[in-house]
């Protein structure tokens, strides 16, 4: 019969003899991996042609459909600065019309051009896994039908956490994980409700609402996170930023 305490002691002794150092990661990531990542980004980039008029009408219609959810979960009076993460050409404008100070972020270059030409908006073009914002600058983050396009959900979760203020909120919508239609070639990550809940809670968020196509999370304080592994991860990430 295996003695758990003995195994724990053996592993403890092993790690004392072989302490972790950053030297182990000197060769990572490889240049080959970086090229692959950029190739995947380009592949997703090529699918983000959503700046046309028909898409624009759909974007406004969809946002109007979610208006009640958005205003109830984070009203602009309490959550004025919002990051529209993975926005379309007109979605950020729709948020501004609701009274938010909205910042649009997209991997779609035509979205950037469309928003500039039609609304005078300066959307930010980039990779959601590496957000170019200081820590704690947003009151809320909206990921509307965009999280399923990410390649590394853990990294996106960490980045959203980082840019949110304390008690900031993250609202996410995605294709229903019970509907096979959502599992298409451009949706890299369609997590079910249990998987998303586990991911968000493991990385420190408080999950307020959760269904197969919707999640609402809140960022707690460091004091509320004491003793949880996620706190160490975020502190390390802050040091990198």
Image (tube, rainbow, N blue to C red):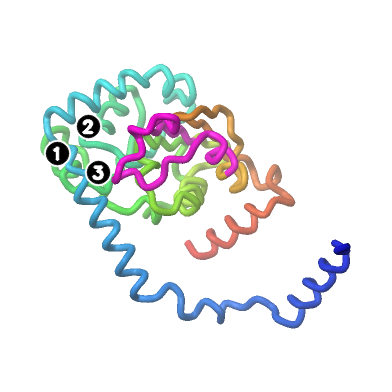
Report which residue position mark 2 lands on.
Answer: 90
Figure quadrant of residue 38: bottom left
Q: Which residue is mark 3?
A: 123
Cα distance in 3D space between marks 1 and 2: 8 Å
- Which label was assigned to residue 45? none
Q: Residue 150 vs residue 167: left or right?
A: left
Q: CA distance from mark 3 to mark 1?
A: 10 Å
Give me the residue at 39% from left, 42% from top.
147
Q: Is residue 178 visible?
A: yes
Q: Which residue lies under the disc numbered 1?
A: 114
Q: Secondary structure at mark 2?
A: loop
- Residue 183: where, in percent of width, then height? 36, 39
Q: Is residue 172 magenta?
A: yes
Question: In the current view of this chain or complex, which residue is farthest to the front?
Answer: 1
- Residue 136 image offset from top left, x and y in percent: 49, 46
Quadrant location of the N terminus in the rendered image = bottom right
Q: Which residues are magenta?
A: 170-198
Tell me where residue 79 appears, x and y as whole percent. Answer: 46, 30
Q: Residues within 10 Å of mark 3 (few under 14, many from 20)?
A: many
Q: How many marks do you count on the picture?
A: 3
Seen at 18% across and 38% down, the residue is: 50
* Relative image position of residue 160 (x, y in whole percent): 47, 46
Q: Please give left or right for residue 213 compared with residue 9 in the image.
A: left
Residue drawn at x 34%, y 24% as measured from the top left: 99
């Amino acid at each position: 019969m295996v003695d758990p305490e003995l195994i724990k002691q053996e592993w403890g002794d092993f790690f004392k003899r072989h302490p972790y150092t950053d030297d182990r990661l000197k060769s990572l990531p490889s240049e080959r991996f970086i090229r692959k990542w950029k190739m995947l980004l380009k592949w997703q980039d090529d699918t983000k042609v959503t700046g046309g008029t028909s898409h624009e009408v759909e974007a406004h219609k969809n946002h109007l459909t979610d208006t009640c959810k958005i205003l109830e979960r984070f009203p602009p009076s309490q959550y004025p600065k919002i990051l529209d993460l993975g926005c379309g050409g007109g979605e950020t404008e729709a948020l501004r019309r609701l009274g938010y100070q909205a910042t649009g972020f997209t991997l779609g270059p035509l979205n950037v051009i469309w928003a500039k030409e039609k609304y005078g908006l300066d959307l930010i073009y980039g990779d959601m896994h590496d957000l170019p914002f200081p820590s704690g600058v947003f009151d809320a983050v909206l990921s509307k039908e965009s999280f399923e396009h990410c390649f590394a959900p853990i990294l996106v979760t960490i980045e959203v956490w980082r840019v949110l203020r304390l008690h900031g909120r993250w609202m996410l919508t995605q294709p229903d994980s019970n509907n096979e239609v959502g599992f298409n070639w451009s949706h890299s990550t369609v997590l079910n409700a249990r998987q998303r809940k586990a991911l968000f809670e493991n990385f420190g968020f408080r999950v307020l609402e959760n269904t197969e196509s919707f999640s609402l999370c809140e960022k707690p304080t460091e004091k509320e996170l004491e003793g949880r592994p996620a706190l160490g991860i975020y502190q390390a990430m802050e040091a990198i930023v």
